[in-house]
Image: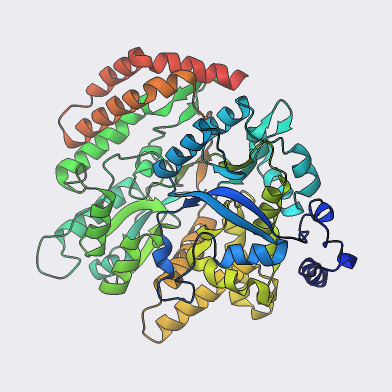
Amino acid sequence: MKKSFAMMLTAALTTTSVCGFAFADEAANDPYGKYDELVTYTTGYSLTNQGADVLAGTPYENDTPENNAYTRYLKELLNIQNENDFEATMGDDYNQKLALAIASQSLPDIIHVPDYSTLVELVENDMIEDLTDVYNNLACDTVKESYESYGDNNPLNTVTFDGKIMAIPKTQLSDGQDFLWVRKDWLDKLGLEEPSTMDEVADMLRAFINDDPDGDGEADTIGLAMRADVYGGYPNNTFGIDNIFTAFGAYPSIWITAEDGTAVYGSVQEEMKDALTLLNSWYTEGLIDQQFTTRTNDDIVALISSGKCGAFIGPWWAPFNTALTSSYATDDAEWINVSAPVGEDGKIQAINTQSYAGFVAVRKGYEHPEIAMKIVNVNAEYSKQDTSDASLEIRENQPLAYFNWPLYCEVQPGNNAQLMTEHVLAAMDDESKVDTLTSDELSYYQSAQNYLAAEKEGKKADSADYSQYMSRIVSMSRMIENPADFVTPAFYETTESMAIRWASLEKIEMQTVLKIIVGEESIDAFDQFVSDWNKAGGEMITEEVNEAIQK
């Protein structure tokens, strides 16, 4: 396989007609064919909140969204180049600029579509190309097999309209369970074991508050840090406390399947009461940050970074958060992820996310729609097998600036994070297996070795190496050893009435939740909230959701 790939790489980087890649018509019909003349495409570049500053002090600090490790690689491999109609930070900023492009009928040639409703709008207005033939003829095996790994939840189902594949779905890269993240150095200092049950978590929080874990002689540490919006967005909601609700069999903010087979909204189910009652008791006792309702995300990061908080709930990749990297660098904090709090079966109760996380679409009429598929192929398969000098920049950028990929569209199997960690762990145990690693896995392996080497010398590892090691090795190993029980939501999308009423419904939901937690209202207020929620449109939306599921 390695020899075959090496031959394919040599061919793809060659422009002779013998290889079949010298002519545009042949390149257009080859998954990795190189165009004879440079082909440009316009796009809207989606920037992450991580920002380009992560490259400061590296040889790549002057890279731009049009000239970086990934765009240079694509230009060398395929002879294509992006020209950005607009650049915007992922989220509201990007969504607004895309909405303007749609409204003005000035859609870029190839575009990242962040949500399903926008994709539907583009399809219904006949603004994007049918990619059925492009996918069937050019999608590489890795892409096809990755989609198929999701079974009935195949992301292709979402982009298929009247039998036509209208976009290339990005797979969900952040799937997995949330954990309780705690300061192990605090546990050790106080002689505490890792908690598991809800009572054990409470005992740990009491000790973190009362027993001076930071050793400064002051009662200035807090218990559990948490977001003001409490839950939602699982598993991408660092500092959310969804796991406390799910441990009680409550699944707020998602649509779940009831015993009678219908879809119901988790936030208005009876199981919410037990979780809210517990949280009220914790808040009253002081186990929860007493200022959580007014803290921003930056406030929580600053609180943890200052060494005054040793517990929060977050995803397996939480070590990438500045709260952990900075407290590790300045406070000798040792963070670990703990499988807690668990449900009745002794496992974390987790929520499956949707299988897709955005889409790549092509403007109708663009003469090279195949470029979108070729870029996804390179990202998903080719670059990950390429260990030649041509991919050196990518391997060096992967731990830091993976977000620079044009049309950033990862396509991976549903359990890809676990598979990659297993491969890296095997290579750490047996060096002969290093040569079997993909370029991504090789970068994670190198980060792990860098981290361990620094620790052995009594030095601080670089933040990127620390984050990769703690996420890919420590955290993911815990997830492999103690897998969660997952609930799959019954419905992910938006109905007609949701678009109009959902914001107000969410507002009354969170107002009630917060008032019960901080003691402004008794738990009895929950029943009134459910009644008000149904009357304000919840009942109508529930009917629409069930109708949509039946279609």
Q: What x and y, as percent, mark residue 199?
A: 29, 47
Where on the picture, by quarter, is residue 367? Answer: top right
Q: Is residue 270 visible?
A: no
Give the side of residue 120 with respect to residue 2, left or right.
Answer: left
Q: Indicate the quadrant containing the C terminus: top left, top right, bottom left or bottom right.
A: top right
Residue situated furthest right in the rendering: 18
* Total marks in image: 0
Nearer the observer, 157 or 125: 125
Give the side of residue 319 with respect to residue 155, left or right.
Answer: left
Nearer the observer, 438 or 337: 438
Residue 178's place in the image compared with 327, above or below, is: above
Q: Residue at x 69, y 79 (%)?
A: 432
Q: Residue at x 39, y 33 (%)?
A: 252
Residue situated furthest bottom in the rendering: 457
Give the side of residue 137 with respect to residue 492, left or right.
Answer: right
Where on the picture, by quarter, is residue 325? Answer: bottom left
Where on the picture, by quarter, is residue 122? Answer: top right
Residue 307's place in the image compared with 507, above or below, is: below
Nearer the observer, 195 or 270: 270
| Scheme by which the image is coloured | rainbow
Q: Residue at x 41, y 59 (%)?
A: 51
Residue 429's place in the image compared with 109, above or below, is: below
Q: What x and y, as percent, mark residue 492?
A: 51, 31
Q: Indicate the quadrant containing the N terminus: top left, top right, bottom left or bottom right.
A: bottom right
Q: Is residue 61 visible?
A: yes
Q: What x and y, as percent, mark residue 425?
A: 58, 70
Q: What x and y, as percent, mark residue 369?
A: 71, 44
Residue 115's place in the image compared with 259, above or below, is: below
